[in-house]
Amino acid sequence: VQLVQSGAEVKKPGASVKVSCQASGYTFMSYAIYWVRQAPGQRPEWMGRINTGSGNTEYSQKFQGRVTITRDTSASTAYMELSSLTSGDTAVYYCATVEGLFDFWGQGTLVTVSS
Amino acid sequence: EIVLTQSPATLSLSPGERATLSCRASQSVSIYLAWYQQKPGQAPRLLIYDTSNRAAGIPVRFSGSRSGTDFTLTISSLEPEDFAVYYCQMRSNRPPGLTFGGGTKVEMK
């Protein structure tokens, strides 16, 4: 099982960022994909998740209206787009499957927001 | 909303010593509590799932337990590679999401 994420991004305040997460080694539509971010020195923070089968999404209230999670089943890939970026959004963004024993994480994508 | 409070924030121990990490939930919760280990520059690594089940490949020196809303991760005898930050995490469906504790750093004395 592998989750491979897209590379590091540098964005200006007010911009948007879209991070991809390509899954392999299992049936993509069998497990939800979660997005978690971690600012430097902070605990991980849940952003949202997508049911990869139905496409239904659920978001943390903190990010509601600013985050959009989608998936492309033909490419076994999930995406997380975060808009209206501020310096407070500088963090490592992870995708993960978090279902009991079936727990796998991407390598993380560093998003830096700086003018 | 469930809040997970970990203690202590830092644990200074020597190799071979026993480590006891605590995670307290703010309300009665399900058993879906997990423990992760994280080293600098790495993603969290699952150690324990559903309160007390070791993940694949995790050494037997790691164990998890529960008493009411108090959860414990015990490392019976610290190895050099165990010095890291540990997080507890709970998965819920109502409301949906993941909640993480603030972490305990196990550092070498």
Image: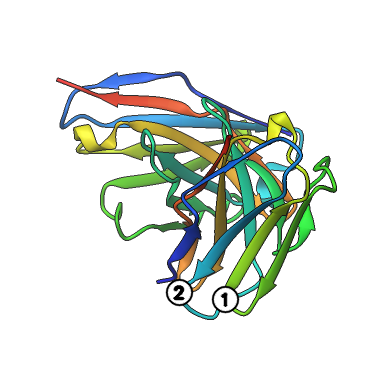
N-terminal of the two: label 2 or label 1? Answer: 2
Q: What percent of the width, then of the height, locates residue A31?
A: 66, 51
Q: Nearer the viewer, residue B72 or B29?
A: B72
Distance between the alpha carbons at the discs numbered 2 and 1: 7 Å
Residue at image position (50%, 58%) is B7
Q: Residue at x 71, y 63 (%)?
A: B50
Mark 2 touches mark 1? (CB < 8 Å): yes
Give the amino acid type for the residue marked by disc 1 in the picture: Thr
Q: Residue at x 35, y 20 (%)?
A: A9
Describe the element under mark 1 as helix, strand or loop: loop
Q: Quadrant of residue B71 in the image?
A: bottom right
Give the percent coordinates (x, y) of residue B67.
66, 76
The percent coordinates of residue B20 (x first, y second) are 65, 55
- State the mark number for residue B26: 2
Query: What number is the disc on residue A81?
Result: none
Q: Which residue is mark 1?
A: B69
Residue A7, relative to residue B89: is it above or below?
above
* Quadrant of the drawing holding the C terminus of chain B: top right
Of the 4 image quadrants, the one containing the N terminus of chain B is bottom left
